[in-house]
Image (spheres, rainbow, N blue to C red):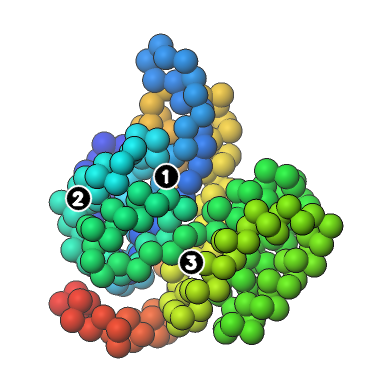
Amino acid sequence: MNNNNFEELNNRNLDNCLIYLLAIPIKIGYKPNDNQATENELYIFFSCNIRGVRKYVTSVFANDFNKTSDWYDFLLSLKNRGINVLLYAVIPNNDKLSKALKLAFNEVNIYISYSEIINKINKYYTESYTRNFYELIRKIYISNDINGFNIAYNDFCEQFVNYDFIKELLDNAFKRVKQYYNTDYEIRHFIFSIYFYRDTFKIISVISHSKKYFNSLDEFINELIPTIQRIESRMFCTKNELMAIINKLYVNYKDLIKPYL
């Protein structure tokens, strides 16, 4: 990656065909100019192209987008940067963004990410208590079949057996996940990218807590650039794994992806 500042990152061309768009939410202290510092939710977007390469896309404050049309304009700006086809989106539980994605990319399949589950758990438990939590979430999202999901869900309920409020808080999230098992295992495994999310989120969290507040978004992203460089310089799957994914996509989306293969 040759880009080395926030403005260049936010204006560079994007890949024409994306397997998925992933939004990682994080809360940061923000104090532009002389305004009072506030805690704002930031969405950090990453993409993965048809060759299995991940790329940083952009970052925006979620509360700057009050309407579906705001998110739609944002997505049009991504299309203007080159995106023609988007097959999957893994995003926070944001109804306005979901609706805008469907308007901007008719073919897109939208999945609510595990961020909702992780953030709710982290409100009440320390990382040491939930050190195996990501592995449990991985099994809930990407077991081989629905039987594997049921086993993982029961394991979750057993871990939090004395805390009914946790299970009730996450009941709707788990109902959504169960529906995702209509999607092939290989696709779910690839697009949810739970360990990539975990490792990237940890780095982002360290940056977000490194200062009481940030004066600008580019100040925050400049701290993230070394991580972006590492992400964009390596592959996160083997060639055989990518071939299996492309083969699955080709069966389902031949007309969409064939021009980009």
In the foreground, 104 or 202: 104
Looking at the picture, how far across and down is residue 101, in whole percent? 29, 57
Q: Name the residue under label 1.
A: 43
Label 2: few (<14), some (14–19) or many (≥20) C-alpha neighbours in 10 Å: some
Q: Earlier in the sequence, mark 3 or mark 2?
A: 2
Residue extending farthest top: 34
Amino acid on which disc 2 is placed: Leu
Q: Which label belongs to residue 76?
A: 2
Q: Mark 3 points at which residue?
A: 192
Q: In what element is the residue under mark 3?
A: helix
Q: Which of marks 3 and 1 is nearer the N terminus?
A: 1
In the foreground, 61 or 232: 61
Query: Disc 3 to disc 1, how far (Cα)?
Result: 16 Å
Looking at the picture, how far across and down is residue 165, in whole percent? 73, 52
Q: Which residue corresponds to the image point at 56% horizontal and 41% vertical from the top-left?
A: 205
Label 1: few (<14), some (14–19) or many (≥20) C-alpha neighbours in 10 Å: many
